[in-house]
Image: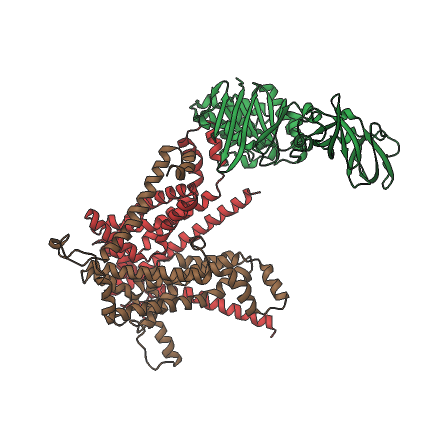
């Protein structure tokens, strides 16, 4: 075999192993859903069943946790996306040290371990306002770092913004508010939609931060973790399977949307 | 202050600028800076019953930080967390680099979108679920034990859950994509001709990577290492699910101070130590790879 | 209604840099006025000060006699056509043109008829529902003009709007702009670094350099009677000879140069001993040596159809350009041949050296 042929073979083997490593665990977890075993496993195989979906559907606490997650997610979108966009708009008009400093502080939550965000939020609100863990603090703590994603996405889009469009609007007699509402905001909408999606997903799957600020509330992610540690049945696999399916659909849809947008932008460029 | 805001005022007008300023301040002060500062302040005070707050005993002290030194178990767990996170980072880097390079420079253009999508999709899946997948794999009666026993590697199943090995393996799996994607993004901007030119000049593959690709990918490698280390050191889910009482992670100690020991001051001190560890790692990476903050936060 | 624009000792500083220095001039109502100069000369700064995006550091800008200080761009009777046009990409052509009326609260029906009227004016009657991205470069240009005219400005400001177009379209749009200006009677203030644009379209031109106005006048006077070395060198082409003034008499100066003594007009009243530069246009050069005769060798000669451009070199290495109209017959100036050329003293001008671009 030639050297090039050998290299191709090795590359292919590496790809198979890597993607196998990525997907096989998820596949095994999914497969365990259909095993008629009390404990989620694929070995030994005790026969095919769909019963764990029924068990899952009858799990009231799961539904409650789902409701909490949806509520928190919606609230985080409502808080984090406007905050992030406002911060990006401000940053876009700052220069020099003020900008560098503000940018560093705004980005720092992404480089801070999630549990520290949870802890600092918990301590701060307890000390200053007497607020203890619960839905409110969960939303605040999650938004504090999810707003960074929204800020970065809006800032990236703003950097490609042609500011003479705003000037043209002003020049034609628009007030600052009219120029913002008719020109800048519509331009930012794609970034707003994307960051709303990201914000919701980040909130939905958050564990480390939520753990410290949730009080007695249980989000779906917390619920799954609790179930794994106490009272694990393949119903958890059924839930995981549903969530993964939804995520994959969402991710694929988002990617297609993003690429279509990128192609359209490329098309318009020349 | 007015001079700093002048461009914003000119562009947005006063009412809108004030609105943006208030919103940004609410985020930066109430949700980021003040909580962190208060946590530090909290960590420097002893835990006191409410009646003694503000009293003569309510003074700043480093006692909460001293606890880590005096408690050998905690110190051991802390050090294990440090090297465990470093190990996770190193292993993920080794696993990810070839994939990132393949995607960025070798993969056929036609297949690339699908391959990248295949990488991105698991990235979107809940961390807890990805951890749970390994819980099933590593279970005593799970497929890995079954496979290894079947292959004759082990005579009978081994306990894989509840030890450090399982935690590390799980972390590598859960965080690997945080390493692949930044490195991929960095190598992608490398002009393929540079590699061809080096090859043409007689450089071998090792030389090409050492002299051309890795220097170009530095910011991506730095970001990948920083993210992976931070996520590993700050992970609660993975050790909680895959570990056991014998393989506790530093985050679990912190959690216990808050919700079982009931000593928030002590917990805040430990949390701050974790934060300092992560910041220290970031600075180390920035120095090692000579990259700036703007390279990292992209 | 068209209005005049007065700049009264306008200065603009950015930190240590003075972009515009003590500029005073009045642009008449209904005039087509151009600011001509190289990039960085301050012409765009003047435009942005008139439109209200910048306030001058000192001095006043008056439009129709009213001081504009403190009045934002959205409150001024001006409309600006941006260099990149700045058409709103998310709106249709009609929405773009109607935008200025929309933000003024003009009802939809009235807006529609105004938009249609403007589209007719710029010869795009069916474009109202098109996307901006569907238009060609020249069509976008017209939409930008229509959008600016929609708000019925007293003054229309144009920031090199033709620079993105190809040559043919650019020449066509010059005529178009001039025609629209005549039809609407609006004061046009035009910024350009292209002398051809300035000369063909403008009633008057201000030539700018380093933030200072070097000369104001109509195209012919700027071309034929430059006040400064910069204007002589920047507008049109010129042969130049540096030297020292030897004598002056009757508005004529004699200049000692490396190629000998040359005579030219002396509008600035130079005195003997002054350093100076003599400028003479290539088309004023003659084949026969009259007052100012020069011996040179032909380096090369380009036949351009209507005229011939020859490049000559004197024995001292001074390069000369000569344009002569082509009237049929054999081409003058065969390459490598010796030639005698010259020019009348009245066709040359002697100016202080200054800042000759």
Res. A27 image quadrant? bottom left
Look at chain C in the picture and name its colour: green
Q: Is residue C216 above or below residue B113?
A: above
* Outermost right residue: C330
Residue B298: give x, y in percent of width and height. 44, 52
Residue at point 17% right, 58% down? B47
Name the foreground residue: B68 vs A177: B68
Q: In this view, does A86 lie above or below C215?
A: below
Residue A199: give x, y in percent of width and height. 36, 49
Residue C131: give x, y in percent of width and height. 53, 35
* Outermost left residue: B51
Look at chain B in the picture and name its colour: brown
Check the image and tell me how it is coloured: by chain
Residue C37: give x, y in percent of width and height. 62, 32
Residue at point 50% right, 36% down? C89
Q: Is residue B111 above or below residue C89?
A: below
| Observer able to see residue C305 | no
Q: Is residue C307 above or below residue B252?
A: above
Look at chain A in the picture and name its colour: red
Residue at point 22% right, 66% down? B67
Name the foreground residue: B181 vs A63: B181
Q: How many numbered markers are drawn?
A: 0
Res. B135 image quadrant? bottom left
| Observer able to see residue A239 | yes
Quadrant occupied by the C terminus of chain C: top right
Name the foreground residue: B186 vs B280: B280
Res. A231 image quadrant? bottom left
């Amino acid at each position: 075999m030639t050297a090039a042929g050998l290299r191709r073979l090795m590359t292919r083997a590496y790809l198979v192993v890597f993607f196998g490593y990525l997907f096989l665990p998820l596949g095994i977890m999914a497969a365990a859903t259909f095993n008629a075993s009390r404990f989620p496993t694929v070995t030994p195989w005790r026969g095919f069943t769909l019963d764990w979906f029924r068990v899952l559907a009858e799990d009231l606490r799961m539904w409650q946790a789902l409701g909490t997650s949806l509520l928190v997610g919606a609230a985080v979108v409502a808080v984090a996306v406007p905050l992030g966009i406002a911060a990006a708009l401000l940053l876009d008009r700052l220069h020099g040290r003020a900008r560098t400093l503000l940018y560093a502080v705004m980005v720092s939550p992404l480089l801070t371990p999630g549990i520290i965000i949870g802890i600092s939020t918990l301590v701060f609100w307890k000390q200053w306002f007497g607020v203890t863990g619960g839905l409110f603090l969960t939303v605040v703590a999650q938004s504090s770092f999810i707003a960074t994603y929204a800020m970065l996405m809006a800032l990236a889009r703003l950097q490609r913004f042609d500011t003479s469009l705003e000037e043209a609007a002003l020049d034609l007699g628009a007030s600052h508010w009219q120029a913002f509402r008719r020109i800048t905001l519509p331009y930012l909408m794609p970034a707003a939609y994307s960051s709303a999606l990201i914000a919701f997903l980040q909130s939905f799957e958050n564990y480390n931060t939520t753990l410290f600020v949730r009080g007695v509330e249980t989000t779906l992610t917390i619920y799954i973790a609790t179930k794994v540690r106490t009272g694990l049945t393949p119903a958890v696999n059924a839930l995981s399977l549903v969530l993964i399916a939804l995520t994959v659909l969402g991710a694929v849809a988002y990617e297609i949307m993003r690429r279509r947008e990128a192609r359209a932008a490329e098309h318009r460029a020349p | 202050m007015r001079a700093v805001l002048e461009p914003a005022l000119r562009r947005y007008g006063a009412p809108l600028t004030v609105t943006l300023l208030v919103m940004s301040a609410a985020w930066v002060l109430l949700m980021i800076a003040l909580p962190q500062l208060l946590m530090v302040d909290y960590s420097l005070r002893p835990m006191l019953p409410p009646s003694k707050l503000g009293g003569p005993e309510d003074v700043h002290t480093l006692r909460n930080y001293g606890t880590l030194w005096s408690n050998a178990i905690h110190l051991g767990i802390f050090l294990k967390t440090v090297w465990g996170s470093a190990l996770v980072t190193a292993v993920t880097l080794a696993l990810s680099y070839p994939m990132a390079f393949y995607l960025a420079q070798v993969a056929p253009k036609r297949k690339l979108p699908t391959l990248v999508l295949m990488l991105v999709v698991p990235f979107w899946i809940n961390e807890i679920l990805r951890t749970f997948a390994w819980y099933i794999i590593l279970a005593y009666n799970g497929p890995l034990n079954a496979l290894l026993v079947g292959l004759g590697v082990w005579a009978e199943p081994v306990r894989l859950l509840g030890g450090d090995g399982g935690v590390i393996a799980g972390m590598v799996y859960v965080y690997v994509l945080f390493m692949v994607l930044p490195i991929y993004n960095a190598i992608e901007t490398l002009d393929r001709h540079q590699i061809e030119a080096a090859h043409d000049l007689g450089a071998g593959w090792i030389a090409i990577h050492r002299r051309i690709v890795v220097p170009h990918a530095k910011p991506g490698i730095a970001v990948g290492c920083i993210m992976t280390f931070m996520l590993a050191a700050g992970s609660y889910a993975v050790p909680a699910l895959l570990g056991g009482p014998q393989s506790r992670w530093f985050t679990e100690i912190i959690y216990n101070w808050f919700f079982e020991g009931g000593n928030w001051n002590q917990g805040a001190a430990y949390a701050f130590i974790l934060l300092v560890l992560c910041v220290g790692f970031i600075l180390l990476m920035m120095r090692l790879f000579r990259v700036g903050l703007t390279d990292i936060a992209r | 209604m068209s209005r005049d624009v007065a700049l009264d000792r306008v200065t603009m500083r950015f930190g240590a840099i003075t972009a515009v220095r003590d500029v005073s001039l009045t642009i008449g109502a209904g005039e087509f006025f151009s600011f001509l100069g190289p990039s960085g000369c301050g012409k765009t700064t003047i435009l942005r000060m008139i439109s209200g995006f910048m306030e001058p550091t000192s001095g006043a800008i008056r439009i129709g006699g009213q001081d504009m200080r403190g009045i934002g761009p959205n409150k001024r009777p001006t409309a600006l056509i941006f260099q990149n046009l700045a058409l709103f990409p998310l709106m249709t052509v009609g929405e773009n043109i109607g935008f200025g009326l929309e933000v003024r609260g003009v009802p939809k029906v009235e807006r529609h008829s105004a938009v249609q009227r403007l589209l007719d004016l710029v010869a795009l009657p069916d474009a109202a529902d098109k996307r901006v991205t569907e238009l060609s470069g020249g069509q976008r240009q017209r939409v930008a003009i229509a959008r600016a005219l929609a708000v019925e400005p007293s003054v229309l400001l144009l920031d090199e709007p033709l620079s993105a177009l190809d040559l043919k379209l650019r020449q066509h749009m010059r005529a178009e702009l001039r025609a629209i200006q005549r039809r609407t009677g609006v004061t046009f203030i035009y910024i350009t670094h292209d002398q051809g644009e300035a000369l063909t379209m403008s009633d008057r031109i201000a030539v700018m350099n380093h933030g200072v106005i070097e000369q104001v006048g109509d195209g012919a006077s700027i071309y034929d009677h430059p006040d400064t070395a910069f204007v002589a060198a920047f507008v049109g082409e010129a042969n130049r000879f540096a030297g020292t003034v030897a004598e002056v008499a009757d508005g004529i100066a004699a200049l000692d140069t490396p190629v000998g003594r040359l005579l030219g007009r002396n509008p600035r009243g130079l005195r003997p001993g002054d350093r100076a530069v003599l400028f003479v246009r290539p088309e004023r050069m003659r084949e026969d040596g009259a007052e100012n005769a020069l011996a040179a060798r032909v380096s090369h000669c380009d036949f351009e159809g209507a005229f011939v451009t020859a490049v000559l070199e004197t024995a001292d290495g001074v390069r000369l350009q000569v344009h002569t109209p082509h009237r049929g017959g054999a081409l003058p100036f065969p390459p490598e041949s010796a030639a005698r050329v010259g020019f009348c003293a009245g066709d040359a001008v002697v100016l202080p050296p200054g800042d000759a671009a």
